[in-house]
Amino acid sequence: MIPETTGPVVLFSLPLAAAIVVFIRPRWAVPITLISGAMLLATALWVVVAVLQHGAWRQDIGGWAAPLGIGWTVDGLSAAMLLLNAAVGLAGAVFHAARPAGRTPVRDPRFFWPLWLFLWGGLNALFLAADLFNVYVALEFVSIASVGLIGLAGGSAQAAAWRYLLATLLGSTLYLLGVALLYGRYAALDLALLAEVIEPDLITAVAAALMTLGLLLKAAVFPLHFWLPAAHGRALPAVSAVLSAVVITAAYYWMVRLWFGPFAPLLGPEVATLLGLLGAVAILWGGLLALLQRHLKMLIAYSTVSQLGYGLLVFPLAAAGAVQPAWTGAMTLVLAHGLAKAALFLAAGAIVLRHGIGRFEALGGDQRGAVIAWVAFAIASASLVGLPPTGGFVGKWWLAQAAVATGAYFWLAVLMLGTASTAAYLWRALQAAAQPARVLPDRAPQDRAPQDGPAALSPALGLSALVLALASTALGLAAPIVARLLDAGLAVPG
Amino acid sequence: MTVYLSLAGVLFLIGLHGFFTAGSLLRRLLALNVLTTAVFLLFVVMARLAEPLDPVPHAIVLTGIVVTVSNTAVALALVVRIAGRVRAHPDDAGSGSRGDAG
């Protein structure tokens, strides 16, 4: 029997090894990525099952214990995130491999697969990390790979990649400054060691504020979301999917890890309310801007700004006393959002390929070749809105329970309003499919529809989105297991 | 030590100011590098202040320098491409179709 500690080692090293191989041998890129992706998905599932059976564990790399060595933590939340990353990574790889390469040329196509696998490995390292400096290195790893992937779309995506690069590097530097202050104060970087010695004094508060600011910038939380819509809206579909579903979530994940870990003594009602208010404004502002978009992918990108806001509601609700339902609800919601958002971006990618353009006016009429994609879009929308029995519904239900239990009706109202706006903008996107075909005056006829007809599109494009959308629904059906998994934690408060 | 601490603080403020006011892409990148250097200086001061001397911050700064060099390389590559694009199509530099990449 192989010990379960092998799982994280595979999750970290396999994508990096595969990235090097596909960089040297671009010809083998697709089969190698798909095979190692399938192995990574299986390994992530194995880790999840191991956490469900034996509970969380911590492993020291190479047998060196902290403070000298570097540790990894595997608990319910990190295992769930590893699985989310594997699911989105594999579905995105299938989508990208199946897209008709000739129709929309990628700048430097041979760099896609190495960057994709590097991002995958970096994200896994980020979810496993247990010390503050390791998190910094993994964050930079993820940033560089993301910037490269955004830039691959060429054209205006490069300007978006530049803005993302500046924002994310500034975020990392602020984070690192916080780490420096904490190290100077406590001479510890390991989360567990830090949690034992931390005291709520001024230096700690400043460090916590700087690190949180850096992560808020990376998570594109209102008002630091300015870079997100262009970067996520203009990238390739598979890239948009992983950025919105996993990369943003990873920054949020570390915010939660820190505030429910070493910074827990600092999480007073004022801080929690401030973070919650940022989330509330993000939900409403992101929802409003999504409603105003005229382009399918930009709508989905703004929706990410809005949906991440729900995650921040965990802070005020947990500080008010309802730790358990708030924690489980917010984490389920973030996971369901990850799966549904990746499905939306992949479906939108297939739809844009079918119609040749992503503006709403152009999406009507004949839908042959995009039917599966629209079905996936609808199912993912249901999960994002929170219709039962999807993962989105279960997450919102738990959050609402937390709000009612603590009498926090303000947050309940935010939850309701956000749901209404989500339903409104997603309905608008779905309506575009039902409208009759329209001739756009500003487009030449040969631009409007693909030359080789809808039959040339591989069904794998829509299917990759459909699988993720169904997974987001299944998350709701498996709610008891999800709750048990998220409870298995070293990081679970209370 | 106070000198170095205040130097780190001043460098950080210079970097932050440059980052938000610089007009050209290269200047912003340089400002970001100054900002990071200020943080590294802070780490080195921490190492000197510790009793006994602490080697861990040095390891951190070394790793940090490697990370920063890689970041700068990626950023420069991107600057070269953006500059080339602006030179080739001076008219449509910040615009372009939104998200039509398939």
Image: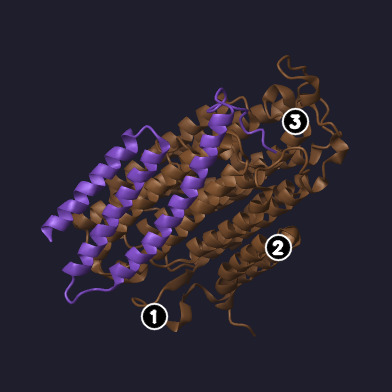
The quadrant where residue A381 appears:
top right
Q: Quadrant of the N terminus of chain A?
A: bottom right
- Is A225 left or right of A335, judged from the image as shown? left
Residue identified by numbered label 3: A356
Q: Which element is circle 3 on?
A: loop
Say which residue appears at 42% left-offset and 40% top-offset.
A279
Mark toward the viewer: 2 or 1? 2
- Tell me whether the residue at label 3 lies in contact with that at label 1, contact meaning CB atoms closer than 8 angstroms: no
- Which of pointers 2 and 1 lies earlier in the amino acid sequence? 2
The chain coloured purple is B
Q: Are marks 2 and 1 on the same chain?
A: yes
- Which of pointers 2 and 3 lies earlier in the amino acid sequence? 2
Residue identified by numbered label 2: A25
Q: CA distance from mark 2 to mark 1?
A: 38 Å
Q: Count neighbours of disc 2 (C-alpha within 10 A) and say few if under 14, some if 14 to 19, many if 20 or more.
A: few
Amino acid of disc 2: Arg
Above or below, comparing residue A127 to residue A193 in the picture:
above
Amino acid of disc 3: Gly
**Label 1 lies in what chain?**
A
Chain A color in figure = brown
Q: Which element is circle 2 on?
A: loop
**Label 2 lies in what chain?**
A
Where residue A104 sits: x, y (%)?
72, 38
